[in-house]
Image (cartoon, rainbow, N blue to C red):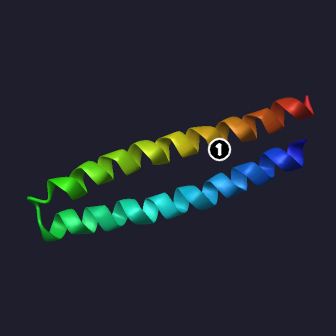
Amino acid sequence: MNDEFEELAVAIDAINERVGDLMYDALRSQARDSADLGARELERQLAKVRRALTKAQMTLRGLEIEDDL
C-alpha cells in the first residue's frame, strides 16, 4: 500500500509543478499589465489549487508513515 501512496504523491507533485508554472505565467502577465484583473484572479485561484495539492501530497505521505507503524 505504501508504494501506491508514494505513486500518488509523486503524481500530485508533478501536477503541483504544472500548476506552479501556470501561476508564474499569470504573475508575469500581471507584471506586464498591472490592470489585468483576470490574471490576478487566476493567480489567486491557482495558488489555492497549489495549496490543496500540497496538502493532499502531505496527507498521502503521512498515511505512508502511519501505515509503517
Name the outermost residue toward the front.
Answer: 38
User: What count of labels does the image hold?
Assistant: 1
Name the outermost residue toward the bottom.
Answer: 32
Residue 14 drawn above or below residue 51 = below
Residue 39, given in percent of the width and then of the height, sits at 23, 58
| Residue at 43% over, 66% down | 21
Relative to 27, 57 lies left or right = right
| Residue at 47% over, 58% down | 19
Residue that numbered label 1 is attached to: 57
| Residue at 39% over, 47% down | 47
Q: Dividing the picture into quarters, in which one does residue 56 lie?
A: top right
Residue 18 drawn above or below residue 58 = below
Which quadrant of the figure contains the N terminus? top right
Amino acid type at mark 1: Gln
Q: Which class describes the residues within 10 Å of circle 1: few (<14), some (14-19), or many (20+)? A: many
| Residue at 31% over, 46% down | 44
Residue 4, given in percent of the width and then of the height, sits at 84, 48
SS under mark 1: helix
Relative to 60, 67 lies left or right = right
Camera-nearest residue between 66 and 29 = 29
Which quadrant of the figure contains the C terminus? top right
Residue 24, given in percent of the width and then of the height, sits at 35, 64
Camera-nearest residue between 58 and 16 = 16
